[in-house]
Amino acid sequence: MGVYVITGGTTGIGAATRLTLLNQGHEVFNIDYRGGDFCADLSQKEGRLQALAQIYHRYPEGIDGILCNAGVGPTVPPSLIFSLNFFAGVEMAEGVRALLRKKGGCCVATSSNSITQEDLPMDLVDMLTDVMDEAKATEVAKDIPQEYAPACYRASKHALARWVRRISPSWAADGLRINVVAPGNTSTPMTQNMTEKQKEAALLIPIPTRYGRNEFLDAQEIANGIVFLSSPQASGINGVVLYIDGGIDALLRSERF
Ligand SMILES: NC(=O)c1ccc[n+]([C@@H]2O[C@H](COP(=O)([O-])OP(=O)(O)OC[C@H]3O[C@@H](n4cnc5c(N)ncnc54)[C@H](O)[C@@H]3O)[C@@H](O)[C@H]2O)c1
């Protein structure tokens, strides 16, 4: 049985993933700012360093996987969105790379299917992935109005997916795999906080597998994809963005893949 580290495993998609792995007999170490096996604010550099120190202290023999799942929605300031959704994912994944190497492990990061929307601000994506400077991103974010936070959310998740695809060959050279899941709207505490108007807007494009029903996906459906990608069954899969959105991506972009 394996040893997996998960970030943001206390509620929602992370909790469903953690429980699925535990039920399969794996050991799971949850890092979250509340209710974690180790509590750390991963939006802060100091929190990430403390979390990494804990992981190295606890698992000197190595780990089988890290699931970089902690994230925030577009209700918080853009600087927090960039720090947690992008920089924390990158730093936690790269931070445990030496431990993953000991066991030929893998990483699965949680992005979003909103990364393909037409109005994606590519300038922000480029700033995140090409400059890779959190202090600079925080400075830029100060001037971004809050109503632009949904676009920042999409940019942060697109940047995460792009980073994973770019880095995946170098992970493979180390005997490691790194992939991304891109969930559609899913019932979790994050979406429970949506206003009725936001929910209606989110359901404007009905999820194909929910044909005729105005429903979001279930957290377990996303967890199943994460657990698969982190398992030996996915040994041939590296650098993919796995859309778990009931077919919305195929519906909107059938000719682009
Ligand atoms: N729910 C959706 O519709 C949806 C769609 C696409 C992508 N996602 C992504 O899925 C992931 C999980 O979100 P969810 O929907 O399960 O929501 P959630 O709010 O239930 O889960 C987020 C988790 O991250 C933790 N967290 C938040 N801030 C943190 C911080 N500063 N430091 C450490 N941990 C922190 C929370 O405590 C929680 O356990 C996120 O990355 C989110 O962006 C969600």
Image (spheres, grey):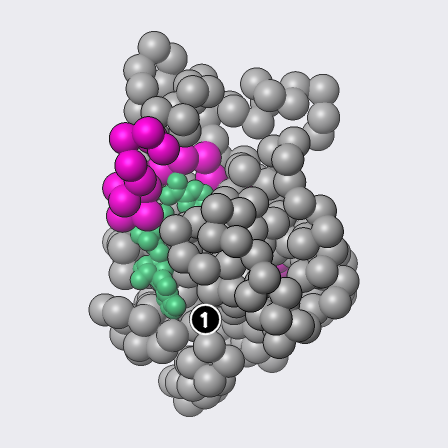
Q: Quadrant of the N terminus?
A: bottom left
**Residue for point 47% across, 31% down:** 245
Q: Position of residue 132 (x, y in %)?
A: 69, 69
Question: Does residue 5 show up?
Answer: yes
Residue 235 horizontal side relative to residue 19, left or right: right
Q: Amino acid at mark 1?
A: Ser
Residue in the foreground of this view, choosing between 89 and 234: 89
Q: Which residues are magenta?
A: 175-199
Does the Cβ of the disc 1 residue fall within 8 Å of ligand 1? yes
Quadrant where ligand 1 appears:
bottom left
User: Taking 167 as reference, is 242 above or below it?
Assistant: above
In this figure, which residue is indicated by the disc labeled 1? Answer: 43
**Residue for point 36% across, 77% down:** 40
**Mark 1: few, some, or many residues within 10 Å (few <14, many ≥20)?**
many
The outermost residue toward the top is 212
**Residue for point 46% across, 20% down:** 205
**Residue for point 27% across, 55% down:** 11
Q: Position of residue 232 (x, y in %)?
A: 52, 53
Q: Secondary structure at mark 1?
A: loop
User: Taking 196 as reference, is 172 above or below it?
Assistant: below
Residue 32 horizontal side relative to residue 238, left or right: left
Residue 238 falls inside the magenta stretch? no
Residue 194 falls inside the magenta stretch? yes
Question: Does residue 105 show up?
Answer: no
Residue in the foreground of this view, choosing between 51 and 28: 51
Residue in the foreground of this view, choosing between 159 and 60: 159
